[in-house]
Amino acid sequence: MASIVLKSLSVFLGLFFIFVGIMKITPYISRELHKDLRQEYVKYAKIIPLARWLDVKIPSKWYRRVVGGLEIICGIALTFIPHRRTKQLANWILLSLMIAAISLHWAVDDKLERSAPALVFFFMLTCRLVVEWQIQRQDKAEAAKASAKPPTAGSTHSHIPAKLAKSD
């Protein structure tokens, strides 16, 4: 059951971030949303904390493209790549992007309706990590339980197969 939840969350989140990343990079899906995102990223690029501390000006165009590209790559990883560690890495990258988005929305005094998607997807990515950790813990417990099974009845030596031990 838990693996169904994990797979569902992975596919849903992956497709969502692919969609949002494409909207940030190109006006192919919605010209109006793309234009709105471009205007918003002009505000965000001015207040990026690391850039302000290092006294570096980051062009909003490249900031938007990098964030969109990371969302697309991580969305593809969550949706299509079956490797567990790759999915975890993608999840952590997206989680850090959501934390950055929440802090930037807060810094520019955006309304809740503007920052709500970042909050919702922060919690969904967190839930995905929690479910994955629970599955890993359950798998480890089952593996430890299987390796600690007592020898089968009738065998006196653990290295002798049960069939041979019965013939003694």
Image (cartoon, rainbow, N blue to C red):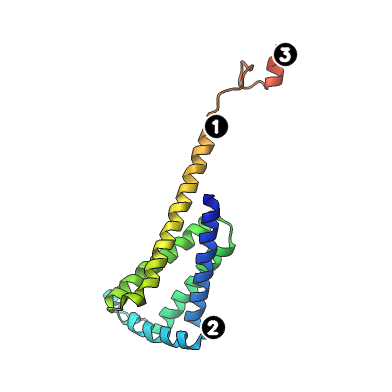
Res. 119 mark: none
Q: Earlier in the sequence, mark 3 or mark 1?
A: 1
Q: Nearer the viewer, residue 121 or 113?
A: 113
Q: Image point 55% across, 85% down: which residue?
A: 28
Amino acid at the residue labelled 2? Ile
Amino acid at the residue labelled 3? Ser
Nearer the observer: mark 2 or 1; the answer is 2
Secondary structure found at label 3: loop
Nearer the observer: mark 2 or 3; the answer is 2
Q: Which residue is mark 2?
A: 29
Instruction: Look at the numbered discs 2 and 3 and tell me whether their residues touch, using CB distance below 8 Å.
Output: no
Neighbourhood count class around disc 2 (C-alpha, 10 Å): few under 14, some 14–19, many 20 upward: few
Residue 8 in the image, given as x and y percentages of width and height: 54, 60
Left or right: residue 97 compared with residue 141: left
Left or right: residue 87 compared with residue 115: right
Residue 152 in the image, given as x and y percentages of width and height: 61, 22
Left or right: residue 42 compared with residue 68: left
Quarter of the rendering containing residue 81: bottom right
Q: Which residue is mark 1?
A: 147
Separation of marks 2 and 3 at Cα, in angstroms: 74 Å
Secondary structure found at label 1: helix
Residue 58 in the image, given as x and y percentages of width and height: 36, 81
Reply above or below: 161 against 69.
above
Q: Image point 49% across, 71% down: which residue?
A: 17
Reply above or below: 41 against 106.
below
